[in-house]
Image (cartoon, rainbow, N blue to C red):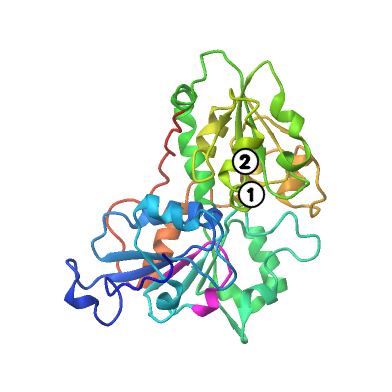
Amino acid sequence: MNGTWVDAPVGPRAGRRVTVPGCRTVLVLVPHVVAATRLFDVLDLLKADRRVQVVCTVPDVGGVSYGTHEFLQRHGVLTLPWQQAIGVEFDLVLAASRRDVEHVLGPVLVLPHGAGALKSRRLTGHGLDRHELMRGGRVTAAALVLSHDDELRVLERSCPEAVPHAVVAGDLCLDRMRSSLPHRESYRAALGVAPGEMLVTISSTWRPESVFGGRPELYRADGHRTAVVIHPTTWSVHGPWQVRAWLADRPDLIIIPPEEGWRAAVIASDRVLGDHGSVTQYAAAVGVPVELGTRAQVRPGSLADLVARGAPDIASALSSRLDQAAELLRTTMYRLMRLPEPARRACAEPVAAHHV
């Protein structure tokens, strides 16, 4: 699958086969499902523009995470083998991870694949360190997307060379959740939750200190409906069959797939029982009551730390451009592609319901 070369719609022979010629080409760099889910939010901002052709690639230099190719196949996006993709120059490269961006040709836009650009679990460093942002003496990203002005101030100290590339654009994932809040009842109905019934979503990141790794008894609590959100890395590492098998003694659980559905489940919930992962932070940011099932060691002042301490207004701590991310990200992408923006307004669309 990863070795089948294609001769269109990009490359020297593409002109003989394309139906819509003269497009700007966009490469989406997808090392894992976590990045894919974040990037597909951004790809929605390019829809309906016949001037733009999107293709994806999965870097294979460090091993491919299970489920990544399958995710792209389900979405019907053309996927180039890695060795072909690194030999073509693109008008824009989109990435939600800094992994392997130095190998591709074209202006790279890098955005976080979780809540904020500063990592809560980094006890030494924070995710905006010089060694992560530079290769061969140059900044690898043409546009480094940040969620908050506070991150820009950290960047000014940690890697001043990257400051001219920084774009404080807020958080599109959060903005989409905020625009979804009026649809809460339809999300509950799609999940099969009856009016007046309590829904608790158990959210877990990966690693042994997560809720799924360290508190299996929480998945067997009675007295309410339970939705289960488990980090895509856990699904990739252990395999979907194994994850579901570990929960097979509770067939009444609403198991949310790793690709999408967690945002609708969080909004539908009366309470989220989580850990230090991003889902817990997003839940707190949209006003869902949050309780921690585990308490891992996190960086003081990080988003996970603020949630653990019950700080108010997590939304403003997560994004300093609330409800502006769609406009700011689209403007940045079209600037890098050297194209005028479409006339229609860019906006954060509500997320789809997850039906059980």
Q: Nearer the viewer, residue 63 or 299?
A: 63
Left/right of residue 219 with respect to residue 30 in the rendered view: right
Left/right of residue 43 with respect to residue 158 in the rendered view: left
Q: Which residue is depicted at the point 78% across and 46% down?
A: 209
Q: In the rendered structure, are the residues bearing label 2 and label 1 in contact, judged by CB atoms less than 8 Å apart?
A: yes
Q: Amino acid at mark 1?
A: His
Give the residue pinned by disc 2.
243
Image quarter of residue 343: bottom left
Q: Which residues are magenta?
A: 93-103
- On the question of residue 152 being in view, the answer is yes
Above or below for 215 versus 195: below
Find residue 12 and report its horizontal and vertical position in percent. Answer: 27, 82
Above or below for 301 versus 263: below
Q: Amino acid at mark 2?
A: Val
Magenta residue check for 264: no
- Mark 1 packing: few (<14 Cα in 10 Å), some, or many (20+)? few
- Total labels: the figure holds 2
Query: Mark 2 and mark 1: span between their CA atoms?
Result: 7 Å
Give the residue pinned by disc 1.
238
